[in-house]
């Protein structure tokens, strides 16, 4: 939870600072706009009220009308002062203060008939004011309207209070929403962090649920794939160590056991020679196993080199056939090479021979007497397809995906009798990969197996 709090707090603070800054700017602009609009409305209302008094004066100009106008303003939140064109006060609804007196003394020769604002500083002055000229057949003058700025300030103060409440409420709601969103965003990150921590401790059996198609989903998929691959490698390593321990222990047990028997004094010469031959066979198997393990180690560490050169493939296959045909004859299996044209192949001759011998030995071991193993070369565009086809017992479909894995055997009960180490096809796969080729396999139980090497043209 501490990690969740740290990440969610960091994400939340970042989003809150950004959104809060935006909100402050928007609230400030909105406040200024509303405040100015309200002040403009008050000033406009003041001018309108003065214009209304002017219209009344020009229509019904007499002492009673003048007193009636003054009386109306006494009972309102504005004040009125009516002067003649010489600046002399005819009537006033309030006491004449210094500011009112100064504004009245201001010359208003060019005042527009619809009135003008003569004081709009509501922040520092006690009044805002307007003036409207009037003219009758009897007299002319000005109607001054005044409004106490304390009322305007109170209006703005209420506006500020409303904005403050709205700002606080908005900030709280924003903080809650951001906290929830940050936790939602942080939760998959925390799960991925916990998963990587398990991976670092060697626990690869993790399951990450991916419900999104965004970057977090891709990251989750990558971690899951990594965990699956590491888990597979761990399983392979354990199986490899178990297999190699078994493969090494078996010949060593035979060697030690028969060596102890061969040391007995009561054995005949023929019996002793028989036991020594068994020891020799087991030693050869052990040497073969160690050699193949060393080859695989070199392939894994890329410490071997592929020296490609171009050579006629039919000549190479015939030489390989001459080398391996005695073992086929002994097993009662016929070996046929079909190479209609002496195509040229670019490969490492030694590694190419190793690939073919491993595949042919594999075909011989699993083919019954009287069957045929065929090596056929075909050209497909710029590629060469080299097929090794036997009529042996075949490979079950469930085993096909695993036959190139180390120490994997289809028939474990017969593996030792056949003399295999379970490493031949793994070496073939690595050598094919080193040449940047491909290998395909197809098989039917009790009908045979075909391995096809696809040698890419260069």
Image (spheres, grey):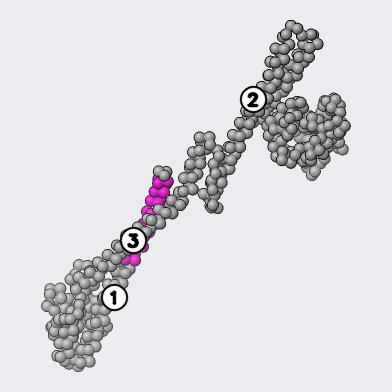
Task: Report the residue at 75% width, 19% height from top.
Answer: 281
Query: Is residue 310 rendered to the left or right of residue 299?
Result: right
Instruction: State the residue position of label 1.
Output: 41
Q: Position of residue 411 (x, y in %)?
A: 74, 32
Does 25 lie within the magenta span? yes
Instruction: State the residue position of label 3.
Output: 169
Label 2 neighbourhood size at 10 Å, few (<14), some (14-19), many (20+)? few
Label 1, label 3: how far apart the Cα atoms are: 28 Å
Residue 124 location, quadrant: bottom left
Give the residues drawn in magenta, as a range.
4-31
Tell me, yes or no, if residue 342 can be seen here. no
Q: The C terminus appears in which quarter of the rendering?
A: top right
Instruction: State the residue position of label 2.
Output: 245
Q: Position of residue 408 (x, y in %)?
A: 69, 33
Q: Secondary structure at mark 1?
A: helix
Tell me, yes or no, if residue 32 can be seen here. yes
């Amino acid at each position: 939870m501490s990690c969740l709090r740290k990440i969610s707090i960091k994400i939340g603070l970042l989003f809150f600072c950004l959104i809060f800054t935006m909100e402050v700017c928007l609230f400030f602009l909105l406040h200024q706009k509303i405040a100015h609009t309200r002040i403009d409305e008050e000033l406009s209302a003041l001018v309108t009220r003065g214009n209304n008094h002017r219209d009344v004066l020009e229509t019904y100009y007499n002492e009673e009308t003048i007193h009636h106008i003054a009386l109306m303003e006494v009972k309102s939140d504005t004040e009125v002062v009516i002067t003649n064109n010489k600046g002399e006060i005819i009537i006033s609804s309030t006491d004449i203060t210094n500011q009112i007196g100064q504004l009245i003394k201001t010359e208003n020769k060019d005042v527009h008939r619809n009135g003008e604002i003569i004081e709009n500083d509501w922040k520092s002055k006690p009044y805002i004011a307007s003036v409207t000229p009037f003219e009758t057949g009897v007299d002319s003058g000005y109607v001054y309207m005044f409004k106490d700025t304390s009322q305007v300030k109170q209006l703005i103060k209420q506006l500020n209070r409303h904005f403050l409440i709205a700002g606080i409420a908005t900030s709280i709601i924003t903080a809650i929403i951001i906290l929830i969103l940050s936790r939602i965003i942080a939760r998959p990150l925390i799960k991925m962090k916990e998963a990587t921590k398990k991976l670092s401790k060697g626990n690869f059996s993790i399951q990450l649920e991916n419900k999104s198609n965004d970057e977090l989903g891709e990251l989750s998929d990558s971690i899951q794939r990594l965990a699956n691959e590491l888990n597979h490698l761990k399983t392979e390593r354990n199986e490899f160590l178990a297999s190699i321990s078994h493969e090494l222990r078996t010949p060593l047990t035979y060697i030690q056991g028969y060596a102890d028997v061969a040391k007995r004094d009561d054995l005949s010469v023929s019996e002793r020679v028989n036991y020594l031959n068994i020891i020799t066979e087991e030693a050869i198997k052990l040497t073969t196993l160690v050699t193949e393990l060393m080859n695989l180690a070199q392939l894994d560490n890329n410490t071997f080199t592929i020296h490609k050169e171009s050579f006629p493939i039919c000549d190479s296959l015939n030489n390989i056939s001459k080398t391996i045909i005695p073992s086929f004859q002994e097993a009662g299996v016929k070996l046929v090479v079909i190479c209609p044209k002496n195509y040229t192949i670019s490969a490492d001759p030694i590694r190419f021979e190793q690939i073919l011998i491993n595949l042919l030995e594999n075909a011989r071991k699993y083919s019954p007497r009287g069957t045929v193993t065929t090596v056929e070369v075909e050209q497909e565009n710029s590629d060469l397809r080299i097929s090794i086809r036997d009529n042996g017992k075949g490979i079950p479909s469930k085993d096909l995906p695993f036959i190139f894995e180390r120490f994997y055997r289809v028939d474990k009960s017969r593996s030792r009798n056949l003399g295999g180490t379970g490493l031949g096809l793994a070496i073939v796969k690595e050598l094919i990969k080193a040449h940047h080729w491909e290998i395909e396999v197809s098989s039917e139980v009790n009908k045979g197996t075909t391995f096809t090497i696809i040698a890419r043209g260069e």
